Image (tube, grey):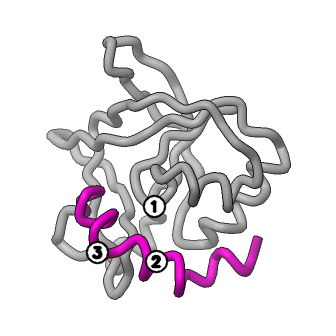
Amino acid sequence: MRNLFTYGSLMCEDIMFAVAGEPLPHTPALLPGYRRFLIKSEQYPGVIQSIDGQVQGVVYHDISPKGWSRLDRFEGELYTRSLVAVRYEQGDEATAYCYVIRPEFRDRLTGEEWDFETFLRRGKKIFQNRYSGFRDI
């Protein structure tokens, strides 16, 4: 599997390029059966399973082994890379990896749904300036 569903900061092409170290083709997609919440004291979210949920995001395609290694280091211990079912805008379904919050870290989630437009307006610059994961890749 060489595809990754992203739902937070990695939806931004510039951040994804900085992390993966390569330009990647991408497609808008939905992740049914999940909800996305803000992580406490951070600008980025985590997803958890929720029968009635749906998360809008982006699938990046054809990630190289080096790109996966960089992504795994960037995401760190907070997340686990899991296979999920996604749905593209035209209705096609596919399988992709997704970084899902580990059960032991769910207490770090707030009850606040994370919003991409709010992140672009208010949180992206803060995230880029202070997120330590960039230094680890």
Q: Secondary structure at mark 3?
A: helix
**What is the number of the mark on residue 9?**
1
Labels 2 and 1: the sequence-earlier one: 1
- In the figure, is residue 22 to the left or right of 37? right
Q: Secondary structure at mark 1?
A: helix
Of residue 132 and residue 13, the one placed in the foreground of this image is 13
**What is the number of the mark on residue 130?**
none
Which residue carries the number 2 mark? 127
Labels 1 and 3: the sequence-earlier one: 1
The residue stretch that appears in magenta: 114-137
Q: Quadrant of the C terminus?
A: bottom right
Tell me where residue 109 appears, x and y as whole percent. Answer: 30, 74
Labels 3 and 2: the sequence-earlier one: 3
| Residue drawn at the location 23% of the way across and 76% of the way down | 110
- The quadrant in which residue 3 appears is top right
Amino acid type, label 2: Phe
Q: Secondary structure at mark 2?
A: helix
> Is residue 81 inside the magenta stretch?
no
| Residue drawn at the location 72% of the way across and 67% of the way down | 73
Mark 3 Cα-neighbour bin, 10 Å: few <14, some 14–19, many ≥20: few
Tell me where residue 119 appears, x and y as whole percent. Answer: 31, 66
Do callouts 2 and 1 mark residues in contact (Cβ within 8 Å)?
Answer: yes
Of residue 67 and residue 79, the one placed in the foreground of this image is 67
- In the figure, is residue 67 to the left or right of 53? right
**What is the number of the mark on residue 122?**
3
Mark 1 against mark 3, which lies toward the viewer? Answer: 3
Amino acid type, label 1: Ser
